[in-house]
Amino acid sequence: MKKTLLCLALFVVPPSTAVAQRLDLSLSTAVITFPSSDPDTVPVIPAAPVQVTYRVRQNNNAPWSLTVLAAGDLISGPSRVDISNVTWVATPAPPFQNGTLSKTVAQRVASGTGNVNPDTLGSITFRLANSWTYTTGTYTQTILFTLSAP
Amino acid sequence: MRGPSLHWAARPAFLMRRRTLTAVLFVLIFCAFSRPVAGQTRNATLNASINGLARLSLSSAAISFPDADPDTVPSIQATQGPITLTAKARTSPNGSITLTVQANDHLRSGVNTIPASHITWVAGGAGFTNGTLSATSAQIVAVWTGSGVRSGTQTFFFKNLWSYATGIYTLTMTYTLSAA
């Protein structure tokens, strides 16, 4: 009975997954700035690239992902610019992928399986679709990057 | 030879071990299925500057009126027909955008002049208004509220009179698009 229980326990809980993953994430900058530009000459405004440093350890063959979620639209007083006007181009692909910001659903920036060790770099360039319809002002919003493994 | 007392003493010990193993198994299974989702988060702030900006384009930079008999053509339409104006502007919330035009002088041909006010226009398009040219003050061509791109037309007319001295008359008009 004792041996049966121990065998069952070992089968149910593989030793490797009994240890929590160790995830590390850092950004080269906490501020992403889009300069004011003429919509006719700069229809899409690129911000300076953000360097993402990430590491995934003790993850074995489990999947991991890096997502980004906006806390809302770009806001300047009573004015707002829909956050879907912000897109990004990310490299290297894979594991990174291009996308569009959302304030409702976290969007995948990168994903993979197993460990990523040592620290690995990715580059994300955010871009704002420029328009004559925007009201003047300084717009801000917070975005949240999450590196996770199930 | 085991007596009844020894037999009873052994039973609790066996139950304790079984319960311990069961508890260990439960903990292990619990760990396996309730392991918290591992995650690292980082915040970043997006900043976007949108400054005031205005741009005006005209479909034609020259407007000409052909010679005509004042009796049969008292008002001469410009050869170019309607001129299309496209105004692009960014302004503050509910800010006004104004398009004006002003002549730099009267129509002049050497020493002869014709008042700029003899040129009028008929406008087409949302926000555009009809008007009369002036050499002394800017005349409103169109007014809008808020940022955006707008288009409209101006068709110019020249008041034809027998009193004009012959000659080729010219003036320059200056359009100003401003956002407040």
Image: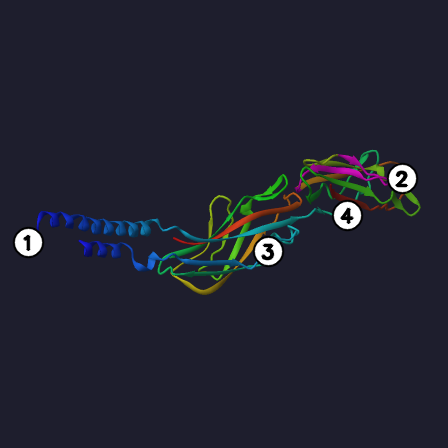
The CA span between labels 3 and 1 is 89 Å
The coloring applied to the image is rainbow
Residues at discs 2 and 3 in contact (Cβ within 8 Å): no
List the residue tagged with mark 3.
A47
Task: Provide the residue span drawn in magenta.
Answer: B130-149
User: Which label belongs to residue B164?
Assistant: 2
Camera-side residue of A87 and A48: A48
Query: How far apart are labels 4 and 3 at the CA level?
Result: 41 Å
Element class at badge 4: loop
Q: Nearer the viewer, mark 2 or mark 4?
A: 4
- For image coordinates 33% across by 60% down, the residue present is A16
Q: Chain of mark 2?
A: B
Q: Residues within 10 Å of mark 3 (few under 14, many from 20)?
A: many
Of B145 and A55, nearer the camera is A55
Give the percent coordinates (x, y) of residue B135: 86, 41
Amino acid type for the residue under numbered disc 1? Met
* Amino acid marked by disc 4: Ala
Query: Residue at image x 40%, y 57%?
Result: A21
The lab-note entry on whether marks 2 and 3 share a chain reads no
- Whole-angstrom CA distance, mark 2 to mark 4, is 22 Å
Chain that bears disc 4? B
Q: Nearer the viewer, residue B21 or A145?
A: B21
C-alpha separation, residue under disc 1 versus residue under disc 2: 146 Å
